[in-house]
Structure formats: structure tokens, C-alpha cells
Image (tube, rainbow, N blue to C red):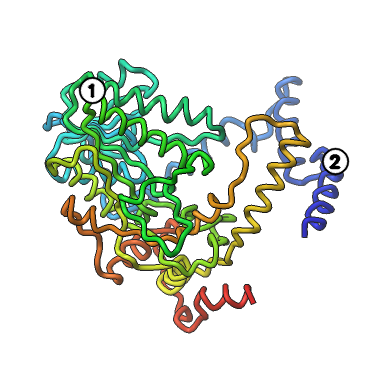
Amino acid sequence: LAGQHLKAGFGNGFKQAKSLNGLSPYALGFRGSIKAFYDALANGSAIDQRFSPEAATRIMALVNKVGDVALPLIGDAPIAPKRSPTKTPTVLVIGGTGFIGRYLTRALAAENLGVRVFSRGRPAIFDDISDKVSVFSGSLKNKEDIKAAMAGIDTVYHLAKAEEKTWDGYVENDVKVTQMIAECALEIGIKRFIYTGTIDSYDASKPDRTITEQTGLDPQVEERNLYARSKAACEALLTKMHKDENLPLVIVRPGIVIGEGGPLQHWGIGRWAGAGAVKIWGPGKNILPLVLVEDVADGLVKAMSVAGIEGQSFNLIGEPMMSALDYFDEIHRRLGARINVSSGSIPLYYASDLLKHTLKKYVLRKQNLKKPVFRDWKSRTQSSPFANAKAKSGLGWTPEQDKESFIQRAIVRANLFGFTGPKSPSVDAAKPVTQLVEKKQA
């Protein structure tokens, strides 16, 4: 297959170099229209009416008419006008425009709390609740911006995360930023600082070990992927500040978060090749630590008000519901969408990663590369079961108990494909994903 791709690539490259796109009807159309327009300007002749300003005006008028007809058909209700703030902000949400952050912000507003969202811009996503939610525009690398955003605030939620390709990038844009935010919280006198870590910082590669908050993060987390390592480093930093400087810290680690507004192509479930194909991490038969985004928001809200939990951590994991294969079976059964699902071999992933690392290091002579570790790949399977007893007892948290309701909220109403369509009449008679994957493995 690699040879076929290589052959096709060289063939296409040769054709492109030879033609320079000059033989493509698509390219010729553009070249001809642009040439005709500028030739007319240069020669002082009349512009072809197809390219005239009058034609452009008529086309845009038509587009506007189409928009006037189409816009009322989009959505069931008009966009709510922005309202003046009536609640004084007492809660700051850093990362409030992200997937979990949006739900958290709305959950806090539903509790009749004044919320301030720290953002690089001024998004309009909270305009309908702008009487309770305000947006502070600033930079997380600017200490004065952070302190200004914390003015009058009692509780800070730190949900922001970095997406870097090097460890130095994570140190600069995640670990150091988190340290600055915590230092500002201490200076301002924040009453509670809630940080969202990740279950990815655990070693979840052992199916015979149940993970609880007492398990402890991976002791060799420096060998893991950069995101898991960075989150663990932030936790260690904040925990030290709690012990040494009395930072009122609470750590919350959500599981694999799903629900409306979340991604179909969730990399916590598998390795995606577009929206139509996915390789599950491993066989895909173990129960995944899935959790609804609404339940995560509820747990975060509760972490603000429960007394005496400073210095503790809580894993927000839903009740055991589905494996990866079960998840894609339900997508097919409920939505009629047949995603091409196959199992991904962890040893093969590791070997491929090791080969790429070797080529980059010894052929391309790249520096500061992270050496692949088999345990890191194995941990992506989330083979270890997770317990949620502490979050339920310590926070009074109650994640969704009913499987049918969970599926409705996680899949049916989640709008995974960007539209709500009718169910395929032949779906129930089709073979489930589990059988197809087992057939491929055989």
C-alpha cells in the first residue's frame, strides 16, 4: 500500500510540475477571467459584463435575498439580545469558552452566580446570559491582566490548556502560566482555586488495577505524552503551593468527556482518519471512563461549595456504561451512521513511533525528541477501570445512572455529525461494530 501511494505521489507530482496547473479547466477559467478583466483596464476597452461591478452587485443582492429567506429557518428561536450585567462577578472561569468551560459557565449562571470569563477575545456565545456572565479580554502571560480579572472574585476555575509540540513549549505556555495564575490567586486572596487535570496522567495500562484518587499519578510520567506530563507537572506545582503557601486548591480530573457540542472525533476513544474511520486504541472491549459534559460541569460547581476539601483531588468518571465498540455500535444503531471501526495494535503503534523517532534522530538529525514509551501507548487503551466513589461521596456528585438516558444525551442529542437526521430503517438489522471488528481481526 505504501508503494502504491509513493507511485501515485510521484505521478501526481510530475503532472503538477509539468502543467503548473495550466491545463486544469478550473485554473484556466480563473486565469481567463482575470486576464480579460485586467486587459480591458489596460486597453481602456469595455469590461466583459460577466466581470463588471454591476454584475457583482446583482449577485450580492441575490445572495442577500437567499440569506433573508434562509436565516429564519435556522434554529427554533431567534438569537437572544445582549443584556446588561445585573450580577456582580464572584467566579472567574479561565478557559470558559472551551467545551467543558461553556457548560460550566452556564451551570454557574443557572445557580444565579455572577461569572467572569477570561478570554483572549470577546466571544458572543454568552450574550443570552450576559446579565450574569461578562467576558474579560486579556492575556494569560500578562500578570496585570490576570490580577485585573480576579478583582472581586472568590473562586477561580482554571480549565485552560496548551497544545504544544515540544516540552519546552508546554513549560512556557502551560506550567509557567499556571504558576502565574496561582501566584495571582494568592496575592488577591482567592477563597478557592479549582484546577482541572486529566486522567491521562495516570498509568491506565493495567486491567487488573482499579484507579482511584489514592492511586497516584504515573510515577514515570516524564516518559508519557507531553500533555499528560504537563498536566501532572501543573498538579505537582499547585500541590506544593497548597502545602507551602496555603493555596486553597482543589483538583478535578474529568474522564473522557462526551456530549452535545463535543467532538465526534474524540482522540480519547481512538485514532481518527477523518470523520468516517477510526482505529480504536487496542481491542476496544474494556469499559471506558466516559462521562457526560453536563455531569462534569455539575461536579465542578459542587467542588466550589463543599467545605474542607482543599488539597484534595476528585476523578469525575461516569458510571461504567460502554466500551469503545459499544459506543460506535450505539452511534450506528441510533443515528444510522456506519463509521469504519477497526482495532489498533498498540505494539504496532509503538513500533511505528519508534521507527519514526529513529529516522528523525539519526537521519534528519533532529534534537530534543521524546523517545517513545510502550507504557504510554498502552495507557491510551484506558484498560484500568476507574472508581468514582470519592467524587460521589465527597462532592455529593451524582453522574447519570441510567444507560438509556446516558446514550440519549451522549449520542442521540449530541448532534455528533452537525445535523439531526432520520434513523436508517435497516440499521437494527445490520451487524454491530463488534462483529465487524472481530471479522477484520480474524
In the displayed structure, 340 sits above or below 160; it is: below
**Residue 249: x percent and y percent?**
24, 35
Q: Residue at x 16, y 54 (%)?
A: 396
Crowding at mark 1 (Cα within 10 Å: few <14, some 14-19, many 20+):
some
- Please, which residue is most extreme toward the top here? 144
**Residue 116: x percent and y percent?**
23, 31
Q: Count every numbered label the image shows and give the total.
A: 2
Q: Residue at x 73, y 24 (%)?
A: 45
Is the Cβ of the residue at disc 2 closer than 8 Å to that at disc 1? no
**Residue 298: x percent and y percent?**
22, 50
Q: What element carries label 2?
A: helix
In the displayed structure, 15 sits above or below 147; it is: below
Q: Which residue is drawn at 20% across and 40% down?
A: 129
Q: Residue at x 54, y 67 (%)?
A: 283
Give the labeled residue for mark 1: 186
**Residue 17: x percent and y percent?**
85, 39
Q: Is residue 61 left or right of residue 415?
A: right
Instruction: Name the residue nearer the viewer: 255 or 210.
Output: 210
Quarter containing the N terminus = bottom right
Instruction: Name the residue nearer the viewer: 37 or 306.
Output: 306
In the displayed structure, 383 sits above or below 160; it is: below
